Image (cartoon, helix red, strand yellow):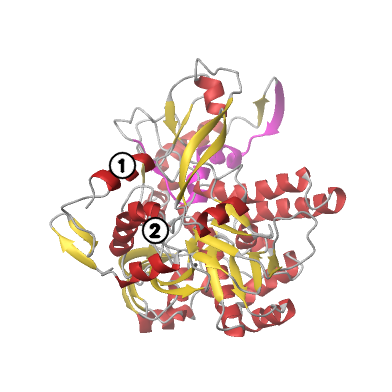
Amino acid sequence: MNDEEVSAFSSLAYQFNRKKSNELLTFNELVNYLWNKSVYKNYYECKGDKYKCIKADTLYWLSKKVNFFGAHNGYYFIEANNYSSKHKKGVHDMITLQADEAYNQAFSMALKAYSGGQNLCYNPGIIKMPYIYDIDLKSSYVNAGHLIPGIRLDIPAFIDEVNISKKHFIHLISKFPNGLFTVDVADIDYELPKKIRRAPVGVKAEIKGAMPCYVLEHKRAPLTVTKVIDLIKHGASIYIHRLIIPEQKKLNGSLANIYPSGKAQDWTLKRRNLAKKKYGKNSAEQELFKLLGNGTYGKTAQGLNAKTEKEFGTDKSYYIPVSKSTNPLISMQYSSIAEYQVNFLMDLICQLYPHNLIPSVTTDGFIWAGNQVLDKDKIVKAIRANAPKQWIIVNDKYFDGKFFEFKSKLSKDTKEYSKNTILVNLKTRFNFTLDGRIKALAGIRNVAPESIYCDLINGVTTIKVDQHRLSTLDDMKHRADNKHLLSEWQQPEYQSLSFDFTSRPTSFHDNGDGDGYYNTEPFRTVEEAETFKENMKPYGRLFPLFNTKFAYDFLELDNHLVATRTGYKIAWIKNDVSLKGNNYLDLVNNYQNDYK
């Protein structure tokens, strides 16, 4: 063994399983191991209660030493001396073990960049327009899986640069292996134009459990290249502190060049299409393969957040372990692609059909309300003329050339839109049409949409509902009073019929009958968004803000933020008398007796 060979192995030693002492394997130890094993020309491998004779050559024994998990995912775990009580021995989780960033410096940035899909309400209120569409991307996360290239994280990055101006970044785009769909992570400052109606990307708030905030500016935001390019397309000024792009295959429509999770999703897509033909579009079989396809994306994000689950047969809770597919670089790319495609489609339809509304957007679709019928062929033609070529190739090859579909909650509904009905669009994931084609009630069950609409137009701000509850599987497994029993009961709850202030109200459209809807704009910063949302929460539960009189009174208030000793607050909200309560009844009591 010469020094050159020893040095070459040392640079790759992290790709092998560590010794029990948690030290890296040395070249001398590997050679001695292979030499000792070389006497075995045949080897019996035990599988269950059966033995199989295999040819045990050098490659067989070498594979026993390779850390395939680390080589595949690009990160390795450094074992801790002390563990949290919620860490299960022998299991890898992101919370109590430390990922070795010496060999994958993009890991921590990607972990911060990962967030779920966008869910926003742009026009809260009661909307009366002739035509209303519910538009969804075609198989959003499965489609995204076909647009994520295979990457290598066990070798140096393709690009790893710091201090990049907008001009230099635009110059670099021509070198990206997959253009807008290049897998990478960037640490970025950005500022969008003040007149923009919708912020295209969201950033995480520091508050635990908070949804991503879609704001005009942010410092040191970890984002994907897909999101950075989308920001530039929307006129943002940017400055990149660091950009890391791993080596990756080139997307050309071939399954051989996409990431393994995408290949698995292609298998589920084919089975789902067969199930639709054999059993029907609403069959349990096709739903199963739909769940498997979306679950593949979920597996790439498993264990990234500090969530726990109970161990079967015990009362102990442990952190959810990472899966063999867990990789923040991949999971963040799924949500980035879905977000980009929704933004692209919204912007395109707004160009083709201006002066209409997009009241609500979700992870894989949005609601459109306007004065004319949408021409699907016209929209598809515009997509083909303007969308990135990789997206077009994938949709033509794997999705029958379909980019989106018009959805309906009604069974056997052949119409593409609602006509001359009312859209009630209160907040994120809470909207419905009175004809039943759109219905998303944010968890409310056993309450007719017509009843909610009647409450709204009569000035009711909070409703009491009896939510139907069932024992969870965890309860049935672990709780002594519930073990092996399925219990059900009615749980009374107070549900607010107010806006959740994901964006700032700027004006109000009066329908002419005492109600209407707001036009909104993005908040400037995350702090502004979270402050406004928190300050307005109790007032939204008490006052009918969709009523025309209350709406105009609200907009006349001084709604800008001012600094106080304890942080920011809305200017008209006074510190000397707070309006709060642990629940709705406490809030009403506080307002009636103490608030002046």
- Amino acid identity at mark 2: Ala
Disc 2 crowd rating (10 Å Cα; few below 14, some 14-19, many 20+) is: many
SS type, badge 1 = helix
What's the residue at 41%, 58% (across, down)?
A: 212
Number of disc labels = 2
Residue at the image position 70 percent from the left and 78 percent from the top: 373
Side (left or right) of 241 relative to 448:
left
Secondary structure at badge 2 equals loop
Q: Is residue 61 magenta?
A: yes
* Picture quadrant where residue 238 is located: bottom left
Q: Quadrant of residue 404?
A: bottom right
Which numbered disc, 2 or 1, marks the residue closer to the eye?
Answer: 1
* Residue found at x 47% / y 80%: 233
Farthest residue toward the right? 278
User: Sequence order check: which comes first, mark 2 or mark 1?
Assistant: 2
Q: Residue at x 44, y 53 (%)?
A: 461
Vertical order, 77 against 222 (above or below): above
Instruction: Find disc 1 in the rendering and name its residue.
Output: 589
Q: Amino acid at mark 1?
A: Asn
Residue 40 % position (x, y): 61, 30
Say whether residue 161 is visible. no
State whether residue 596 is above or below residue 54: below
Residue 31 percent location from the top left of the image = 47, 39
**Is any atom of residue 437 visible in this view?**
yes
Residue 319: quarter of image: top left
Q: Is residue 575 left or right of residue 201?
A: left
Please state the extent of the stretch shown in magenta in the rendering.
Answer: 50-79
Q: CA distance from mark 2 to mark 1?
A: 52 Å
**Disc ID at residue 106:** 2
Q: Is residue 148 magenta?
A: no
Is 456 situated left or right of 156 in this image? right
